[in-house]
Amino acid sequence: MKKILTLTLAAALAGCATAPQTPAPANDPVTLRVNVFRGASNLPIYMAQEKGYFARRGITLQMLFTPNSTEQRAGLAAGKFELAHAAVDNTVAMIEVAKADAVIVAGGDGGMNEVLVRQDINKPSDMRGRTYVVDAPNTAYALIGRKIFKDAGLKEGQDYKIFPLGGSEARTKGLDTPEGAATLLNPPWNFLAKERGAKSLGRTIDLFGPYQAQGVFVMRPWAAKNGSALERYLAAYIEGCRAAQDPAQRTLALTVLKRDLKLSDKVAEMTYAELMTKGSGLAKDCAFDMQGFRNVLALRAEMEGQWGGKAPDPARFIDMSFYNRALGHARP
């Protein structure tokens, strides 16, 4: 099985766009609940809704917004929804820590994160004696910040504290008091935080490197029983990703961002620009970034000490077969 998964992943990463056409699954009506953080990474979903891509595949979509990753992981495992979109390190945590049978089935984007701090902080080492505000301390973007501070010579729990406040939307106001001195935020929340007086120490893609951030994950038993519905969902998601990145549909994408995230024209424009930034923003066809995921695993191995400090084979966490088949019948 491991060999099959590895070959499937290699095919997906080597040339998904050239995958052979496969028959589309039957469009039997289905309602799918998808759990997300409120933010710009949802633009492919919003565009797929706007363009009717889910509806034409018989999918009624219910979007549910999570306040934090802890509730999202628990909710997916408990069957409160069928799909989740978030940093895929959450899937790794579900599998390795919670022993839940989850699996990553698609990529999305590179995170678009910035290290944001109070005005009196000029470099990571200035965090000595301060507090780093995170979603959850042991997953995803929080680990990137911990790595940056570690490389600056700071010891967690000794030189600085960590405070779990929740998702990006909540952390936008996380720097309003001296206790909250740094956080990681992505669009549009990074721009809104800077409007409130925060400043940036840089983008994580520059400070840390490539990172497979937003992706799609589900419970493996559900995927095995509902492969047709999952493929249809992913086909619509891929088409929404294409629409989001289509220069001819830029005006519509901006309209959707302003409406669904309640953004000003200026912030919507900046958010769209970040979404279009190669390596950090949306991946082509919302594909999975293998090198970015290897960095995810290496970071978890280093910062959490899992697997004896050595990252495992990525194939154990992913199944791109549904994505590959969806890519085969997604419309250009």
Image: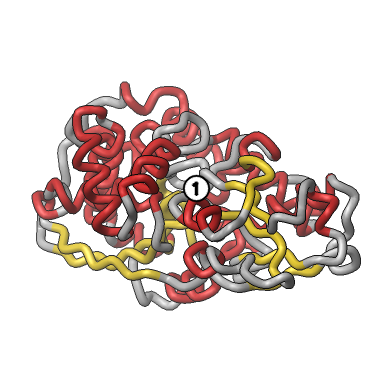
What amino acid is found at the position of numbered circle 1 in the picture?
Ile
- Crowdedness of circle 1 by 10 Å Cα count: few (<14), some, many (20+)? many
Label 1 element class: loop
Question: Is 99 situated left or right of 56 in this image?
Answer: right
Residue drawn at (14%, 46%) of the image: 51
Asked whether residue 302 appears in the rendered view, the answer is no
Asked whether residue 61 appears in the rendered view, the answer is yes
Rendered location of residue 221, percent (x, y)? 40, 64
Residue drawn at (51%, 41%) of the image: 110
Picture layout, residue 216 above or below residue 202: below
Question: Is 23 situated left or right of 3 in this image?
Answer: left
Which image quadrant: the C terminus? Answer: top left
Mark 1, residue position: 318
Question: Is 326 situated left or right of 71 in this image?
Answer: left
Rendered location of residue 70, percent (x, y)? 55, 73
Residue drawn at (54%, 43%) of the image: 212
Picture layout, residue 22 above or below residue 257: above
Rendered location of residue 134, percent (x, y)? 64, 65
Residue drawn at (33%, 52%) of the image: 264
Q: Nearer the viewer, residue 285 or 234?
A: 285
Q: Nearer the viewer, residue 34 or 22?
A: 34
The quarter of the picture where residue 240 lies is top left
Rendered location of residue 11, percent (x, y)? 43, 28
Q: Nearer the viewer, residue 329 or 263?
A: 263
Figure disc tally:
1
Judging from the image, the colouring scheme is: secondary structure
